[in-house]
Structures are given as structure tokens and as C-alpha cells.
Amino acid sequence: MTANVEDDQRWLALAVEQARIGWSEGGIPIGAALVHNGQLIAVGRNRRVQQGSVIRHGETDCLENAGRLTARTYRSSVLYTTLSPCFMCAGTVLLYQIPRIVVGENRTFESSEDLLRSRGVRVDVFDDLECRSLMDRMIVEKPELWREDIGLEPSAQSRTV
């Protein structure tokens, strides 16, 4: 599976578009796209807020939107995501043996890249300015939602007894 930077940027832009849509819906601005042999299979976005879900992250929403695919399809696809995947999403990648992930940015969050690489997944990080800007804005404007999304307790000043 060869990488073409122009193609990667085009597919990552679709994931960014999903992140923007999620943010405009009041959700968390993380998007994803699944591509197989240069063909878009599905896109998704974090819908935890919109659907009251604990598992609808951008990557899992994208894979759910892809529907049932053959193992061969997953094993030769690329997952594009605006933010480095959490362990749950990384586990999904490992389960379906997706061989490559293109990450828009990992400055605001990075937890599973070493695990993915240790299991043979190629992880390419683009350090995309728009991906960083979306996450930086979300963290500033909705810090408690961000803490919840990454599995942290509310900050001390926002706790209620």
C-alpha cells in the first residue's frame, strides 16, 4: 500500500469536513474517513453529544457507517482521522486489521500510536493546522466536554456534590 501525499490530504480534508459538521451540531470536532483502493467507503464524526453515546467516536462512527465489509477490504484500507485515536478506536483498528491510519494531529491527544505501531499498523501524522485549530478551540470553549471525551474526571471547580 503506497502513500500519496496529495491523496492523503484530499481524504483527510473529508475527515476535517466531518469534524466541522460535528462541531456545528454542538458535538466534538473529530472526523474520520475510510478509503479502500482510492475509493471512499464511508465518513463519520464524533457523535457522542448528538446521540448521547459513549462509543460514537469519529472512527467508530465511520466504521459503523461503512457497514459490513469483508476482512480483505478492511485489511487493505486506510483510515483517516483528524485526531490521534483513543484506545477504543485503536482496538477497532486492530480488530479489523486496518493496516494504515493517517492522523490529522496528535498534539492535543495521543494515547495509542505506540500500541498501533507495535502491532504493525502504519501511523502517519500530518500535524494539520486546521485539525489543531478545531481541537484547540474546542478545548478552550468546552473544557469539561473535552475532559469527558478523553475519560477524565471533571475539573475541581466544576464538580458538584
Image (spheres, rainbow, N blue to C red):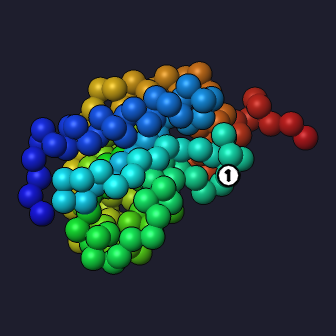
Q: Position of residue 84 (x, y in %)?
A: 38, 48
Residue 9 appears at what percent x and percent y?
20, 37
Indicate the position of residue 56 as horizontal and vertical percent values: 58, 52
- Foreground of the two, 154 or 53: 53
Circle 1 Cα neighbour tier, 10 Å, few/some/many (<14 / 14–19 / ≥20): few
Residue 10 in sight: yes
Q: Quick one: 88 or 1, which is closer to the camera?
A: 1
Looking at the image, which residue is at 34% across and 55% down? 41
- Residue 119 in sight from this viewpoint: no
- Residue drawn at the location 28% of the way across and 54% of the way down: 35
Residue found at the far right of this picture: 161
Task: Identify the residue shown where x is 29% and y is 26%.
Answer: 129
Mark 1: amino acid: Ser
Q: Tell me if 111 is positioned left or right of 125 in this view.
A: right
Which quadrant holds residue 34?
A: bottom left
In which quadrant is the N terminus drawn? bottom left
Instruction: Write down the quadrant of residue 17 in the picture.
Output: top left
Is residue 158 left or right of 143 when viewed as pictured? right
**Vertical placement of 138 versus 150: above or below?**
above
Task: Give the position of the C terminus as an image quadrant.
Answer: top right
Residue at point 9% right, 58% down? 2
On the picture, is 58 further left or further right than 115? right
Counting every numbered tag in the picture gives 1
Q: Secondary structure at mark 1?
A: loop
**Observer-nearest residue: 152 or 76?**
76
Residue tagged 1: 53
Q: Position of residue 107 (x, y in %)?
A: 36, 38
In the image, residue 97 above or below residue 12: below
